[in-house]
Amino acid sequence: MTTLSLRRFRDAPWLWLAAVLVLGYLVYRPGLAGGFLFDDFVNLDALGATGRVDDAPAFWRYITSGTADPFGRPLSLLSFLADAHAWPADPAPFLRTNVLLHLLDGALLFVLLRMLGTRLRLSATHAGFAAVIGAALWMLHPLFVSTTLYVVQRQAMLPATFTLLGLIAWVHGTARLATSTRAGVAWMCAAILVCTPLAIASKANGLLLPLFAWVIDGVLLRGHVPDAVAPLHRRLRRWLLIAPSIVVFAYLALHAMHPFDPVADRPWTIAERALTQPRVLIDYLGSLVVPRVLTTGLYNDAYVVSRGLLSPPSTLAALLGVAALVAGAFAVRRRFPAVAAAMLFFFAGHVMESTVLPLELYFEHRNYLPAMLLGWPIGLAIVRMQASAAIKAAIAVVLIAMLAAITFQRTSLWAQQERMAWLWAARNPDSPRAQATAGIFETRAGRPELAIARLERRAQGRPGDLQLALNLASARCGTGGLSPADVDAVARALRTATEGDQLVYRWLAEALGLAGTGRCRGLDLDTIERWLAASRDNPRLQAMPGRQQDLDSLTGQLAIARKDPAAAVAAFDRALAASPTPQAAAKQAAMLATAGCYAEALHHLDGFARLPVPAHVIDTSWSMSRVHAAVMAHQDFWPTQLRGLREEIAKDLKQHGSTRCMR
């Protein structure tokens, strides 16, 4: 009976973990009623880019189609296939998979922390309970709602899964060295040589697994390796952890070679980004230390850039604060190894995304993996308290319950997208992206007057902001039409905008379709032509071949609307000459054929076949894009598609003749 009771007591941490996992699911359950957001639409549409993914050729086209980083994130793309094989899709399966993956990451974190606790010579019971508390504080923290319930950020969650597996394997391998050298080496090699590629195949920051392992090994495992195998352990650490980490640092150094040069698509330089990131990191830590129901969410485009050490004044203070935290972690690494490891792990996790890579300045999901150890010192402090087990358990339960309650409120908000958009707009008054999104929801809800009031006030202070100007025009259409002043405002924004150029093609295409219906007073084909001319006057758009191709394609569509086949063909020919891709040729020929211009469509396809492929279209670097091009070539995909399209158009030409063109 005594032995059974002790075993039950020793196994209690696993029972507590099970309870925390159930609590985590219940806390996140309201969020399963949410939907797709922001970047979801421009990433998940790969599920339908070349047709339904329901056979082997379609699978390989899809799995190699990633362009978010040079590695293409094929495992992340593969995971989306578990939820849908086509696009558009139901968001519920995607959200459910994200929540289950988050719970899995929490369970793996418990395993890692328990192993580390035993390496610090804690009893199995204390190590287990500290691990439960540490894992629960991370898993139930409200900051990670914006990762878990934002479908596309599975690409941040999967690298964490493989990183945790790698760290577990490394810690286990170092322990096995003492009893079986061969087994220990095998585990340690598998940790890095297997799990790192898997993490990278989920997202490029999987490259940081060796650095994370170096932090844990250097702070928590140092001194716990038997002398007999210490030289072997040092060699393994040198080649498996330190050498890859140095490669990462060298890669980052290359991006810092020209810190003051302009950065494409960004309103700041690399030097200014590097100055800004200490403030961002301090803000991250503030959100982790003080959990909140509402944060700035997805829209952080108004984050103030640091232009100098005192511009804004908090820049220097943040820089000194980060330096002090890193130096302090090194200073206390022997006396308080868990605290030091948690802090160094956090900063190691931000080495790529919060330094010199030209990414957007601020995103909450970047903390998902770096913050994983921050709750563990709290768990260790609780189990080491000089107090009864009941008091310790009560403290842990209160902390976990508080986080769970805040997170439950936040997941409930995330399920209400319209309300969430308004709250984000209120929290980010200077964010054009947040204001435009709130305006879109107000217009869709049949209240365009609210959108106009919101956007008009802000557009006056930012006349060159495309998001504000274009969405204000859309809202105006919902209340009767555009005035000459509204048309002028859109033209001015298109002519002077320095950001948001990806909006131009999509919005003008929608406006062109609306102009043909006559439902928006003041929006006609002449207005579209004026806006296209304004877009061509924008120096930024002139310097981007892809955008010029978009504008030429829109000019061709405008010519079709005006029933001018010669002008349409000329515009489409210019678009193809700028960037001769089979996708563009097929789309343009299809538009001509839909307008009854079968001979012109065939002539357009003939012209594409004669065009040489320009050098900038050929990918000569190693990247997933090059692999994708090879897959498409092997399958003869586009030639087959174009042949089929040509046959259909030729059949229509034979049946209807050439007299139906644009009639």
Image: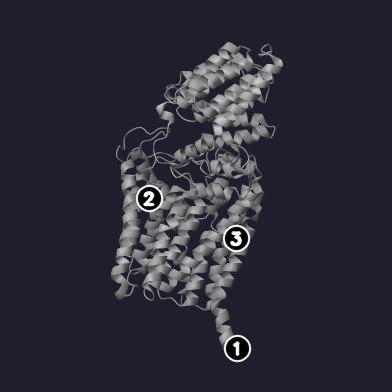
Disc assigned to residue 1: 1
The three-letter amino acid code for the residue at tag 2 is Val
Measured Cα–Cα span from mark 3 to mark 2: 29 Å
- Gap between marks 1 and 3 measured at Cα: 34 Å
| Residue density around tag 3, few if under 14, some if 14–19, many if 20 or more, within 10 Å | many
Front in this rendered view, residue 510 or 610: 610
Q: Residues within 10 Å of mark 2 (few under 14, many from 20)?
A: some
Residue lying at the far right in this picture: please name it: 655
Q: Amino acid at mark 1?
A: Met
Residue at the image position 51 percent from the left and 16 percent from the top: 533
Residue 595 in view (yes/no): yes
| Marking on residue 351 | 2
Q: Is residue 125 left or right of residue 87?
A: left
Q: Which residue is mark 3?
A: 24
| Corner quadrant of residue 529 | top right
Q: Percent from the top left, x then y, of residue 619?
A: 42, 34
* Quadrant (top left/top right/bottom left/bottom right) for the C terminus: top right
| Secondary structure category for the residue under label 3 | helix
Say which residue appears at 61% left-offset and 67% top-offset: 19
Q: Amino acid at mark 3?
A: Gly
Q: Residue at x 30, y 37 (%)?
A: 258
Q: The N terminus lies in which quarter of the figure? A: bottom right
x%, y% of residue 310?
A: 33, 41
Q: Earlier in the sequence, mark 3 or mark 2?
A: 3
Q: How many marks?
A: 3
- Given residues 444 and 38, the one toward you in this image is 38
* Label 1 element class: loop
Provide the secondary structure element on which disc 2 rests. loop
Q: Are marks 3 and 2 in contact (CB under 8 Å)?
A: no
